[in-house]
Amino acid sequence: MKVFRTGIVGTGFVGRIHVETLRRLGNVEIVALTDKFSAESSARQLNISRSFTDYREMIDTMHLDAVHICTPNNTHFEIAMYALDHGVNVICEKPMTTSIRQAEELVKKAKEKGLVAAVNFHNRFYPMTNHLKNIIADGELGDVFSLSGSYMQDWLLFPTDYSWRLNAAESGNTRVVADIGSHWMDLAEFVSGKKITAVCADFSTIYKTRKKPKKNVLAFSTEKFREEDYENIPINTEDNASVMFRFSNGAKGSAFFSQVIAGKSVAIDLVVGGYKKSAEWNSENCNRLVIGNRDSCNEVLEKGFATVHPKTIPLVAYPFGHLEGFADAFKQCFRQVYASIEKPEGDYDYATFEDGLHEMILCDRIFESNEKQQWVEL
Ligand SMILES: NC(=O)c1ccc[n+]([C@@H]2O[C@H](COP(=O)([O-])OP(=O)(O)OC[C@H]3O[C@@H](n4cnc5c(N)ncnc54)[C@H](O)[C@@H]3O)[C@@H](O)[C@H]2O)c1
């Protein structure tokens, strides 16, 4: 068995999940990490022997097979480009970049170099979302005419909540849409096998000014400070986005994305309407899929080897009743990415840099649609 040498860039919230889940694969050794601010302490806590404050030094010296990019959005482009240029496969967090041009350059570079370049749209890897994709492909729901739902969070509800995501220079033009809407849109397109072709968006921002702590805080921190330890900053990205969609097969839909709905921590809901049946998946009950019937009882499917589509069985790690969640979805995504490094010609479900570019175009058109207050085609 080949054991891959991997480096992690960024050891905040999501970087630590990458470390934990990669270790569960068994064929990936995390040989080094990079963090601009906390390299040494992260390396100690995570028991990783080499740490760097500059990703270039890590890539130049550690003979890596792959690098995982888990840093703020505006840094993804330069890190991914450097890794690809140095022959290293890339697993990049979403959104892939902060501009379409950067995403296009990365797609081109990955192709030129013949390297694996993946984006961590991990919602594709819950057994029940994968099952949904497979039963839609088999025609069980009938032709799909609607995809609707929401992705709601509450971690930015108070004006003192802060993260680099509130700074458009670090996160990009759209916040809620790029940060969480991108997950919903990727999932809707993945399960339906159809692409979004036009969007109509309406944004709102509940705080035009927020209080930024003077000291650095990690994403999702609930730390509170004294009044004088905050500075007021203007907010020019959206807290809420309502978006209508048209899909390539004529299906239509809409979704609400928000980071300020109290009590919703990470709540993704997707309802698919078909001519025979409907289906609903919700991330807060992610081991379950509800099939809606008109003339008989609704069906509640629970994840298990015996209950999922045959093509989904490889994504089920534990028997019926043993729940699998957020980190398990990361693990299954990474399992496929590493398998594809060894064996490129396979049937893989992970999002590629082409998919990442498509999401960047979607975010851009949604931003444009809100500015113009009209439908925009892709
Ligand atoms: N797939 C998912 O569900 C998911 C979930 C959360 C975050 N994300 C994505 O992951 C990325 C990171 O988000 P987060 O929540 O972990 O943020 P975070 O603020 O918790 O962590 C970012 C880390 O990157 C480090 N860093 C910043 N600039 C750096 C640089 N130039 N070089 C090296 N290290 C640097 C910071 O010190 C920090 O440790 C974002 O792109 C975000 O959209 C994805």
Image (spheres, grey):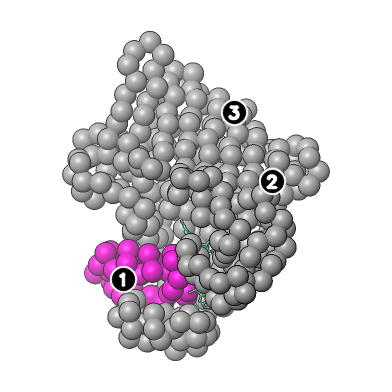
Residue annotated with mark 1:
28
68 vs 313: above or below: below
Residue furthest out toward the top: 295
Q: Tell me the SS state at disc 3.
A: loop
Residues drawn in magenta: 1-29
Q: How far apart are marks 2 and 3 (CA)?
A: 26 Å
What residue is rendered at 23% in x and 39% in y? 304
Residue drawn at (28%, 64%) of the image: 25
Q: Where is residue 79 in the image (x, y as percent from the top left)?
A: 56, 75
Q: In this view, does 5 lie to the left or right of 150?
A: left
> Within the image, what quadrant is residue 312 found in?
top left
The number of numbered discs placed on residues in the rendered structure image is 3
Kind of residue at badge 1: Val
Q: How crowded is mark 2: few (under 14 residues within 10 Å), some or many (20 or more)?
A: some
Q: Neighbour class for label 3 at 10 Å: few (<14), some, many (≥20)?
A: some
* Mark 3 or 1, nearer chain start: 1
- Which disc is residue 204 wearing? 2
Question: Which is nearer the eye, 361 or 300?
Answer: 300
Q: Does the residue labelled 2 lie within 8 Å of ligand 1?
A: no
